[in-house]
Amino acid sequence: AQKVTQAQTEISVVEKEDVTLDCVYETRDTTYYLFWYKQPPSGELVFLIRRNSFDEQNEISGRYSWNFQKSTSSFNFTITASQVVDSAVYFCALSEIGLNNAGNMLTFGGGTRLMVKP
Amino acid sequence: EAQVTQNPRYLITVTGKKLTVTCSQNMNHEYMSWYRQDPGLGLRQIYYSMNVEVTDKGDVPEGYKVSRKEKRNFPLILESPSPNQTSLYFCASRKSWLGGPDTQYFGPGTRLTVL
C-alpha cells in the first residue's frame, strides 16, 4: 500500500530565509504521481504542483522549487526567500495509477506547518 | 467558474443529531470523494464515488453515509454524530475515477464540531 511521510510537523523560519519541506513516499507501482498542496490559515486546499514518476527534472516556479529523487523516494519542496504569506500547512500526496487503486485517488502525508515570522 | 462547493462551512451540533453536509461540483466530474482532516494525520478518505449510484468505503467510513443520485452532488450524512467526528471535512472531485494525473479539486471545507 502507498504511504507518504512528512517527518517535519512544524517549521519556523524568519522572513527571507530559505526553507525545505521534506516528503518521502512508498509505493509498489512504477507509475505514479506526486502532488503538493498548500493550506493557508483560511483552510482551503490549494494545488501547487503535480509530478509524474517518469519525470525527475527539478521544477522551479518563482520562489518555489521541487526536487524529485526517485532513488530516495523523495519529493522535497523548497521555498526561497520565504515570506509571511507562505505561512501555511503544506501537504504532499501520492496517486498511483490503475485499477488496483480506483478508490483512493490520493494518499496524503500528515502535513508540515510552516510559520514564517517577520 | 469551475468549483466544488460545500455547505455549511461551519457547523456546531450535539451528539446524536443527524446532519448532512452537501457537496456539489459543476465540472461534470465522474469521481467524488470525502475526506476528513485531523491534526498530524493529514487527510483521510471517508467515502468515494466513481459515478452515479456507485459508492464505496474509504479508509475511515465508520459513522458516515453517502449517496450519489446525481452526478454533481455527493452529500455526506452523519446519522448519529459523536464527538470523535469533530473535524475538518473536504469534498473533492476529479474528472476520472482512474488514478493518474488528473488534479483533484477540493471544496472549501466544512468545520464540524460535535458537542
Image: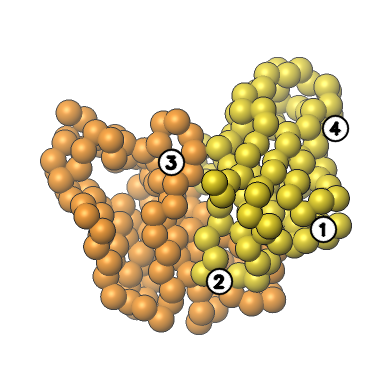
Chain colours: A orange, B yellow
Structural distance between the alpha carbons of marks 3 and 1: 30 Å
Q: Nearer the viewer, mark 2 or mark 1?
A: 1
Structural distance between the alpha carbons of marks 2 and 1: 21 Å
Amino acid at circle 4? Glu
| Marks 3, 1 in one chain | no
Q: Which element is circle 1 on?
A: loop
Q: Nearer the viewer, mark 4 or mark 1?
A: 1
In the rendered image, which residue does mark 1 sit on? B52
Q: Which element is circle 2 on?
A: loop
In the rendered image, which residue does mark 3 sit on? A39
Residue at image point 73% right, 34% down: B21
A82 shown above or below B103: above
Q: Residues within 10 Å of mark 4 (few under 14, many from 20)?
A: some
In the rendered image, which residue does mark 4 sit on? B79
In the rendered image, which residue does mark 2 sit on? B100
Q: Residues within 10 Å of mark 2 (few under 14, many from 20)?
A: many
Q: Nearer the viewer, mark 4 or mark 2?
A: 2
Number of numbered labels in the structure image: 4
Q: Is residue A15 left or right of residue B81?
A: left
Amino acid at circle 2? Gly
